[in-house]
Amino acid sequence: MTVKLPEAIYDSQEAVEKLLQELEIRTTYRKEGKVAKFSNKVNDSDTEVTSWRFSEWDYEKERIKLPCNARGLFTSNGRICVRGYDKFFAVDEIPKTMQSSLSENSVGPYEVSTKENGCIILISGLENGELVVCSKHSTGKRDLSGKNHALQGEAELEKQLEAVGKSRRELAELLYRHNLTAVAELCDDDFEEHVLSYSRDQAGLYLHGLNYNTIQFRTLPFDLVEQFSNDWGFLRVHHFTIDSFEELWKFLQETAKSGVYDNREVEGFVVRCRQKDTNHNFFFKFKFEEPYLLYRKFREVTRTYLEKDVSPRTIMTYLVKDHKRPILFYLEFIERYFKENPQAKEEFLQGHGIIKLRKLFLKEMGFGELDGMGLMNFEGFNSMFSELSLEPTRYKYVLIPVATIGCGKTTVFRTLNELFPNWSHIQNDNIPKSPSKSQLVDSCLTELAKPEVDVVLCDRNNHVFRERSQLFDQFLALKENFLPADIGLKFIAVNFVKSTLTKDKLWDITLSKVSKRGNNHQSIKFNEDEDHARSVMLGFVRRFKYLDTSVEPDSLFDDVIEMDIENENFSFNNTKKVIQELSKFPELQKAGIDKVDDTQLKSAFEKALSYVPTFTKTFKNNKPSNKKKNKESGSNKTEKKKKIVYFGVRIDSEHIKGTLSKVLTGNETWKSLNDSKRVQDEFHLTLSHISSTRDKEAGKHWTYLSKLFDATQIQLKNQENSNGIHYLDFFCDVKLTRVVVAKNSLICIEAEIIRSNNSSGKEVDISSGNRFPHITVGTTSPDIKPVKSNHILEILHIRHGNDLPNGEYDIDSPAQVYAMPDNYICKGMRCYAHF
């Protein structure tokens, strides 16, 4: 019986246009809420579709309101043509999927389906009758090496359509007519192995969804999906219905004990239900932790063993925190296996033989292919483990700071070195530039190889994940060249920046400390070139990534010592804290670490403070210092010509600040900006920015203003101008209409130029190139640039129109709108050029 699909559901053209406008705006975002836009050509066609891709992290952040939560979104000719599921989460992964929330806020019936273990394929039809087959974010041929999931999915679809005697065009027309996307899972071990096994007769496309191509997620019930699957030759996803959440939860907990359902290993289940308050479709997943975490760890340690050429002992010591017993025997097994089957190494690294290797290991240990849980609970490991144990007999310690410039890490480490001369202090700033990227780690291991050295203080900021990962990789790869196998390393993170410390506060603390230190630093010479010092420091703060021990590389630390840099004598107190925390390690107790008294500590601390660097490490400075400029002022050296960066209108800020204090009485963001001194000293309305010339229409506006203001002459006159501003003989009357407060982000004032004239009083046409002219009052953090006001206003007006009464509006973060007093006009405001 052929499936009877319900009538198509469509969004209004206006709603889709708003969506596309907002997506375009978000392509200009730098971080949160950014959209990546890709143009794709349908396979064997000239038809173009556009893919819109959000960051995976943005879906789970409640403060970010995405214009559409689809994971897999394609548009063509002003309509959504392909739509995946809304991103959905595992139980306990986010607040909405906590057990208590699901029990209270979801309603049945609960449609439960097995979670197939492959890659998503999206299938839809276009207006011209063409079939489009996509992976999550692309379709058609790509100029990239590696696997093309969309083309492989299309090849599988061709085979199944041929088997049921139907054509691509028939499927495309049906999906287009009902405005649907078919969502399937491509499972094929010959193409790409995952964790679960799919034999040749099980391989293909498993259909598990039919979604409407609408902004709001709407999907058809599973009984229609199954009928559609039968009609068009898709493989069947096992599913069933449970009426109550209590019954559902009992079933999930019981099945998780074995990790097996219907006599096959499954990764877990996808549950479809509805939200109690909105009646919208809502999905969540229940994933079995075991034995799949163990299976994934098998894959990871095998890849590490093959790619990095490290011994099983090293892998066990530094990379394995859980499942130690089965992984120890697995490593011993693969070491033998790859010696006997060297050709299998390359196959594994190409993604083949992963499941075969696991099954061979299970068989060797006396377990069936589906008995991963039995392997984990094997009691025989206890007696066997002591015979095969690769655990070190003693440890040495590596202290690794997570910090930025000015946190006091070198002061703490020098104090420790004064107290314990046998602890080696290796400063990255003391290492000259070298072609070797591992010189810091080489130096640390050289010291640790000395019998008397048990601790090395690896002094570098390590402010981003990449640097922390680099250290672990290098220690892992090089350790065996320096230390015997029975000596292990423990890595201790000395975390100078707590997760509760905002970047604004971090900037204030570190800037204050470094400015007081002057030139007494190996790389930051504050007295010599303050602008350059600030620029370098601010770059470190902006890039800083907080320590997160839930993910690699930070999860590889054996221990974390939390520092506090918010108190007055933080370097002294932090040194004391490090000593207290390290005294729990037996090897260090022998060195007398627990016997240090305050007198010894104060003496060592004073010596550390009196240290004067003898080696200077420089950061690249593209801008010459004042000293260098003065030295070259009499030379014939050609300096780069100054260029105009933007044209603006200077606005009377003091009067406006007084008005804002009345309009925004009690507003927390306004109070925060004032308390943190982040209200801008000078206000301006931007007329046009040089960066706008990348856009054709905006570029015309820049050219018009450049001619009107005689930009060429301005630039010639201002080559020696040091303040970067040239006032123009043009004036504007600017009306301020409303204040927009983006919570925890920024405040801006919408404005319009109602009259403009030259110095003779003659009216001239001066306007702002911004779609919504505005004045940025201030941002809550150095990380938030004033240009974000454009994004905030564009999304606010796209979603809520141009007539905005006072109130709170839903954008990425809540936005509050306050009307300015009637006819609030700043008269005779002068235009200027900024270099």
Image (tube, helix red, strand yellow):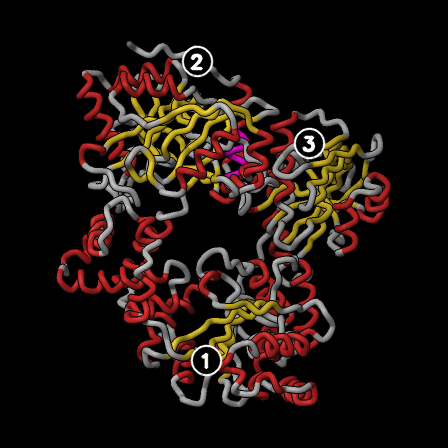
Q: Amino acid at mark 3?
A: Tyr
Q: Nearer the viewer, residue 831 or 567?
A: 567
Secondary structure at numbered mark 3: strand
Task: Report the label total.
Answer: 3
Look at 42% across and 33% down and name the residue there: 270
Q: Amino acid at mark 1?
A: Ile
Closer mark to the observer between disc 1 and disc 2? 2
- The residue that label 1 is drawn on is 431
Write down the region rendered in magenta. 21-28
Secondary structure at numbered mark 1: loop
Give how far across and how far down residue 588 sits, in percent.
52, 82
Q: Amino acid at mark 2?
A: Ala
Q: What separation in Å lies between label 2 and label 3 (alpha carbons)?
A: 31 Å
Identify whether 423 is placed above or below 778: below
Question: Nearer the N terminus, badge 1 or badge 2?
Answer: 2
Look at 83% across and 49% down and name the residue there: 654
Question: Nearer the N terminus, badge 1 or badge 3?
Answer: 1
Residue 417 in which image quadrant: bottom right
Give how far across and how far down residue 636 sits, in percent.
52, 72
- The residue that label 3 is drawn on is 809
- The residue that label 2 is drawn on is 8
Question: Nearer the N terminus, badge 2 or badge 3?
Answer: 2
Identify whether 302 is placed above or below 701: below
**Magenta span includes 24:** yes
Q: What separation in Å lies between label 1 and label 3 (alpha carbons)?
A: 54 Å
Secondary structure at numbered mark 2: loop
| Residues packed near mark 1 inside 10 Å, few (<14), some (14 to 19) or many (20 plus) | some
Residue 484 in which image quadrant: bottom left
**Residue 426 appears in view:** no
